[in-house]
Image (cartoon, rainbow, N blue to C red):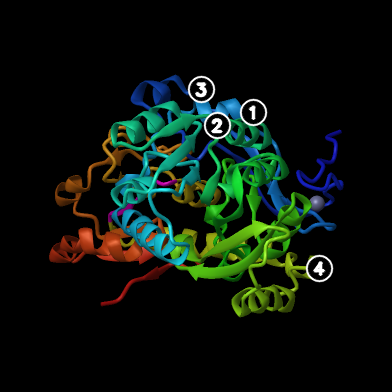
Amino acid sequence: MTSIPLCRFCKTPLTHTFLDLGAQPLANSYLTAEQLAAGTERAYPLHVRVCHECFLVQADDAVPADHIFDADYAYFSSYSTSWVAHAKRYAAAMAERFNLGPESLVVEVASNDGYLLKHFVEMDIPVLGVEPTANTARAAVDAGVRTEVAFFGEATGRRLAARGDRADLMAANNVLAHVPDIGDFVAGFREVLKDEGVLTFEFPHLLNLIEKVQFDTIYHEHYSYLSLLAVERVLRSRGLRPFDVERLSTHGGSLRLFCCHMGVGHEETEALVALRAEEHAAQLDSLDGYVGFAPRVAAVRDSFRAFLAAEKAAGRKICAYGAAAKGNTFLNYCGATTDDIAAVFDASLAKQGRYLPGSHLPILSPAAADELKPDDLIILPWNLKDEIMGQMARIRDWGGRFVTASPETRVVEG
Ligand SMILES: [Zn+2]
């Protein structure tokens, strides 16, 4: 008998399923030819539940954390041009809004290869990156971004503060969902943030995931799926509170939450109040907001399977674009294999020559599309749709079509 897991924040037994995707390989574990031939790939349950006390939506702890981080980490932030532009705009906006200068300190947690902090360095604003993955941290240091290799949490936060690294601005982009102990992680910010400092969290908004059926953003490396409601509870429990929010188009709909110490006088903005009301209207503060998601996900899968079957019957060649985690969840849940899709193209040199986990599609350079000449190109990272359609526009020369698969499978017109 398996025991019922406890909420990773409030420790309530998790008796309600949000979505059970079955056994899945790690979405970022791209296989070499030797690994593929050895047949040793492992799959772990991917079961997401909702806590009926604090409404934190969370995945079961099915994978030891060191397995996830041991996975050959092939992701470098700077590879996506739209993400780099997003980081640059953020740096300029924050420097202006919070009057940052040579006396300030900006600390980013999960700073990756310095894709964000380098824009502050260019403005002569001191920075510190905290990054657990050694090879990405090295890339940041090479780019002139001071970086500490560490996992962040309360202990690391205390250590940094004790040696004088206290921040006017802290940023954590797309990392809050990746931490197993969200309470300890948030406590680290409280330690490092100066009394009047501001911290911003960016995370994909759970309400978008539900409304747009973005189940492909669910994978083992994401421990939680976040609403304002759940994040605010975690923040307040650790002496922090939100005061403003911006809505971003990244990852299909993200929030940028502005937070400060509990006792600091930032007034709550109308945007924050409106978002709370919106989540209440969507019933995210009761179980009613979460039931009914799983059948909608099954319908997306059925629509995609029907599309693949029809295209195959018509003798059309199907390829995909984007060897990203979200595509892997989608393909594996849909049961897609090389019988259905010939290859996936991706611009990342680190991924080319490897194979997608689970589906085992070969990852090829985008240039290979000119030889394969796919009739259909499925865009897996739908958040980068416009960028990918621009880069691969030439498939239309031979009559190729772009296809998106979420929230329903459809050919992109025009
Ligand atoms: Zn809970």
Q: Give the side of residue 37 with respect to residue 288, left or right.
A: left
Q: Does the magenta run of residues contain 37?
A: no
Circle nearer the N terminus (3, 4): 3
* Mark 3 surroundings: few (<14), some (14-19) or many (≥20) residues within 10 A: few
The answer to whether residue 56 shows anywhere in this view is no
Residue type, label 1: Pro
Q: Give the side of residue 267 with respect to residue 345, left or right.
A: right
Give the SS element for disc 1: loop
Residue type, label 2: Ile
In the image, which residues are magenta? 317-324
Residue type, label 3: Thr
Report the front residue among 236 and 400. Answer: 236
Circle nearer the N terminus (4, 1): 1
* Mark 4 surroundings: few (<14), some (14-19) or many (≥20) residues within 10 A: some
Circle nearer the N terminus (3, 1): 3
For disc 2, the marked residue is 68
Mark 3 in CB contact with mark 2 (< 8 angstroms): no
Mark 4 CB in 8 Å range of ligand 1? no
For disc 1, the marked residue is 64
Residue 407 screen position, x and y as percent: 51, 67
Mark 1 CB in 8 Å range of ligand 1? no
For disc 4, the marked residue is 286
* Mark 1 surroundings: few (<14), some (14-19) or many (≥20) residues within 10 A: few
Classify the position of the N terminus by image quarter.
top right
Residue 38 screen position, x and y as percent: 44, 19
Looking at the image, residue 60 lies above or below residue 265: above
For disc 3, the marked residue is 40
Mark 2 in CB contact with mark 1 (< 8 angstroms): yes
Residue at the (78%, 68%) spot, across then down: 285
Tag in front: 3 or 4: 4
